[in-house]
Amino acid sequence: MNPSHDRRPWHEGVTAYQWLVLVIASLGWVFDVFEGQIFVTSMEQVIPALVPKATDPGTIEFYKDVINGCFLLGGALGGVLFGIVSDRIGRVRTMVYTILVYSFFTCLSAVSREWWHMAAFRFLVALGVGGEWAVASSLVAEVFPQRARARSLGIFHASSVLGTYLAVAAGAFVVPLYGWRPVFLLGAVPALLTIWVRLSLREPVGWQQAKAQAAAIRHEPLGRITDLFRGRVLRNTLVGIGLGTIGLTTFWGTHIYGKNLFLRDAKARYTAHLPPSQHEQVVQAHNRELKHWEMAGMLLATTGGGLGLLAFGPIAERIGRRGAFLLFHLAGLVVALVTFQLAGLGVLTVALPIFGFFTLGMHAGYAIYFPELFPTRLRSTGAGVCFNLARLAVFPVLFVTGWLQRPLAKGGLELTREQSASLLSLLFLVGAVLLFFAVETKGQDLPE
């Protein structure tokens, strides 16, 4: 039966083992995102503790962006490195290694004494975080049948919302009561998942066949990164890196700061009609309540983002991968610009879920689209390069935006966070233009 004319429910015929693969891969991704977002939910407390001399908002934002930039740099290296390892030694073994790496170094982050300690640990955490996504997405793509691939990979990527929820819960309830260090100790928990991975999963048949073929045909080895930049694969690689760069830059420079809009307006309520000299004292007095407001904003944006992640797969099946990306890029631009210009908690309660739907929802497309661009012998390497090499571009962008927010006296331009986030959201337009060069993979089998 032609997959494009198959009217059966997408989940009909999916085996118990295929569901098991989806569950385990998703749990790895849940904890992956949890480890990545722990710093985001606690950075308002981490930076003052590690950089006590940073008192002005611009300098504090600068250190946040530098540490997040180190995380992105580590993710880029880890995504490429573990992508290659996955193509060469297998998906299952590599997934175990990535989970152990991000668990161990998140736990060690709790002992940070200086800001550069945290930056170094975040870099090392990101090695595993970047690698796990490439491995898990390739595994799900190779195990599920074509007609179920987009939906299963959409569910896989949407599971990231659960990881963010866990980080939000830690930020809302653990940080105010016990401080930020115990939150990072929780990073050791995902290591237990590796036992289940090793006992339950086996390597996909397609990868085993590619391995056997690579042994017989010397000029087509597994996971050779230079093969991504030659022949027919080159175009797909460049488009994938471009899309990933747009998505990750707008995520770290725009999406994650949606939560700060709630925090901003909550602070304004507490300090209304008070002279500026009393603002800091009042903010400190209401620190716990303000932390809850901040996490409430993150919860709203993440919930909308989760719905967007789940929606991307069905939309991509209906109008194609390129059409879905185009819709989310254009809508993401509009809602980001509008949201960052709004004021008032009541309006933001409605706006933030819509903001999250489009600015985060397109990320499910990377899990769906990137594995479809590359043959089996390069699939994990290609997906890892597209999703994580993009982080190299994000690092200098965040460094520059952090510098732009520094005070004029320190060489910056003293832009507000809202202004810099709005400026970065214009990159969605670049993503829309890039789609004219992208190939359509809807209804096609994975390339062998």
Image (cartoon, helix red, strand yellow):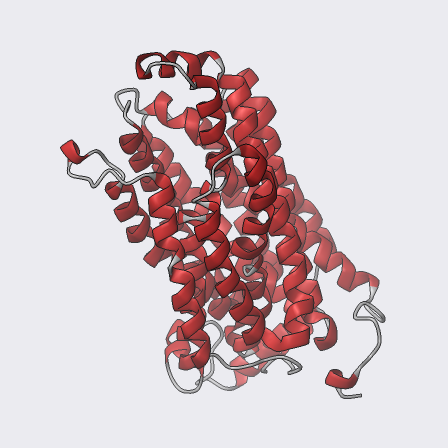
Left or right for 304, reference 12: left
Displayed quadrant of residue 133 = bottom right
Q: Position of residue 204 (x, y in %)?
A: 67, 69
Q: Check the image and name the residue furthest to the front.
A: 273
Q: Position of residue 310 (x, y in %)?
A: 67, 58
Which of 58 and 25 lies nearest the eye of the viewer? 58
Above-or-below relation of 199 to 364: above
Q: Residue at x 42, y 28 (%)?
A: 44
Which of 144 and 239 lies nearest the eye of the viewer? 239
Above-or-below relation of 361 to 191: below
Above-or-below relation of 291 to 38: above
Q: Position of residue 8 (x, y in %)?
A: 84, 76
Q: Residue at x 29, y 37 (%)?
A: 62
Which of 17 and 315 lies nearest the eye of the viewer? 315
Number of residue marks: 0
Q: Residue at x 41, y 81 (%)?
A: 235
Displayed quadrant of residue 10 = bottom right
Which of 49 and 243 lies nearest the eye of the viewer? 243
The quadrant of the picture occupied by the C terminus is bottom right
Is residue 436 visible to the viewer in this orientation of the structure? yes
Q: Residue at x 71, y 58 (%)?
A: 22
Above-or-below relation of 272 to 359: above
Q: Position of residue 177 (x, y in %)?
A: 56, 16
The quadrant of the picture occupied by the N terminus is bottom right
Is residue 30 visible to the viewer in this orientation of the structure? no
